[in-house]
Image: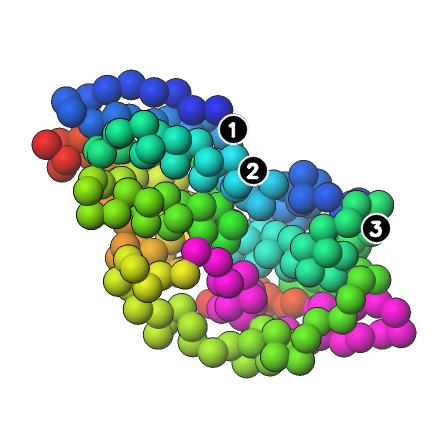
């Protein structure tokens, strides 16, 4: 599982460098995100613009990461493609995650 | 009726290849991009269940998916020779329980897992599960032009 990191304002932007977040990579995906959270990053923007598909295991990893952030910080999404948005809507998780178009918009929401 | 059979070894790393092929076949059969993605999601969940629950994550078994379609519907037959599905799982798959609709969206209450069968229930028009001798046969049908 590869991530690319950058900073916008006071947010850590984590770009997911995988096209599919599914059962075989979901544990590493969650592990990677939890490492950022445990590393003290409180405002995280997860850039999903390269992700074309996510299954229920991938969604579970996202939910687990959001729970790990807890009330001390925020984890928001940006760049979600149609299939990912469709999955979030199908499971009503679009009401749980804050979803933005670009990393800049997402980072602005956290400042 | 046009027909295609796909077969993979029971490893999670093979599921994406199956999913991509199913998406392409669904688009060829006439589903638009969003519906083809939903069908792909449903089949990825079904095949992942076969590997995780029927085969308990063991490699070197086979999961077979037969895709067939005519002008009215797209049908997927998923076969494995693992452990049968539990009755309550079959009931959840076929009848659904509205778990997604009734889920408390408070962050502390949200479950990380357990959505796979409900996703299949929500995205497919007909679902049949049969134990045929020593194999599981899950038949998933999506109407063309519906949902």
Q: Are marks 2 and 1 on the same chain?
A: yes
Q: CA distance from mark 3 to mark 1?
A: 26 Å
Q: Nearer the viewer, residue B28 or A11?
A: A11
Instruction: Report which residue position mark 2 lands on.
Output: A25
Chain where mark 1 sits: A
Q: Is residue B126 magenta?
A: yes
Q: Nearer the viewer, residue B64 or B111?
A: B111
Q: Are marks 3 and 1 on the same chain?
A: no
Q: Secondary structure at mark 2?
A: loop
Q: Classify mark 3: residues with Cα within 10 Å, few (<14), some (14-19) or many (20+).
A: some
Q: Secondary structure at mark 1?
A: loop
- Mark before the other along the chain sequence, 2 or 1: 1
Instruction: Report which residue position mark 3 lands on.
Output: B61
Chain where mark 2 sits: A
Which image quadrant: the N terminus of chain B?
bottom right
Q: Which residues are magenta?
A: B112-139
**x, y percent for residue A104:** 19, 27
Please indicate, yes or no, whether residue B123 appears anywhere in the rendered image.
no
Please indicate, yes or no, whether residue A89 appears anywhere in the rendered image.
yes
Evaluate if marks 2 and 1 touch, with contact meaning CB atoms under 8 Å apart: yes
Residue appearing at x 28%, y 42% in the figure: A69
Instruction: Report which residue position mark 1 lands on.
Output: A1
């Amino acid at each position: 599982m590869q991530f690319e990191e950058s900073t916008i304002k006071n947010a850590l932007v984590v770009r997911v460098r995988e096209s599919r977040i599914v059962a075989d990579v979901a544990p590493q995906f969650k592990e990677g995100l939890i490492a950022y959270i445990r590393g003290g990053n409180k405002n995280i923007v997860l850039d999903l613009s390269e992700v074309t598909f996510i299954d229920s295991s991938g969604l579970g990893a996202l939910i687990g990461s959001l729970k790990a952030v807890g009330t001390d910080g925020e984890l928001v999404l940006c760049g979600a493609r149609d299939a990912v948005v469709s999955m979030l809507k199908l499971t009503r998780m679009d009401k749980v995650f804050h979803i933005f178009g670009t990393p800049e918009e997402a980072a602005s929401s956290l400042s | 009726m046009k027909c295609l059979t796909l077969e993979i070894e029971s490893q999670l790393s093979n599921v994406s290849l199956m999913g991509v092929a199913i998406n392409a076949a669904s688009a060829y059969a006439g589903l638009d991009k969003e519906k083809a993605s939903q069908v792909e999601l449903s089949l990825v969940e079904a095949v992942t269940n076969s590997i995780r629950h029927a085969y308990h994550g063991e490699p070197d078994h086979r999961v077979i998916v037969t895709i067939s379609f005519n002008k009215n519907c797209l049908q997927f037959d998923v076969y494995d020779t693992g452990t049968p599905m539990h009755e309550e799982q079959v009931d959840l798959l076929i009848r659904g329980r509205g778990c997604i609709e009734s889920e408390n969206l408070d962050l502390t209450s949200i479950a990380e897992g357990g959505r796979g069968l409900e996703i299949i229930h929500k995205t497919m028009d007909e679902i049949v599960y049969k134990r045929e001798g020593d194999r599981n046969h899950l038949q998933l049908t999506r109407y063309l032009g519906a949902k």
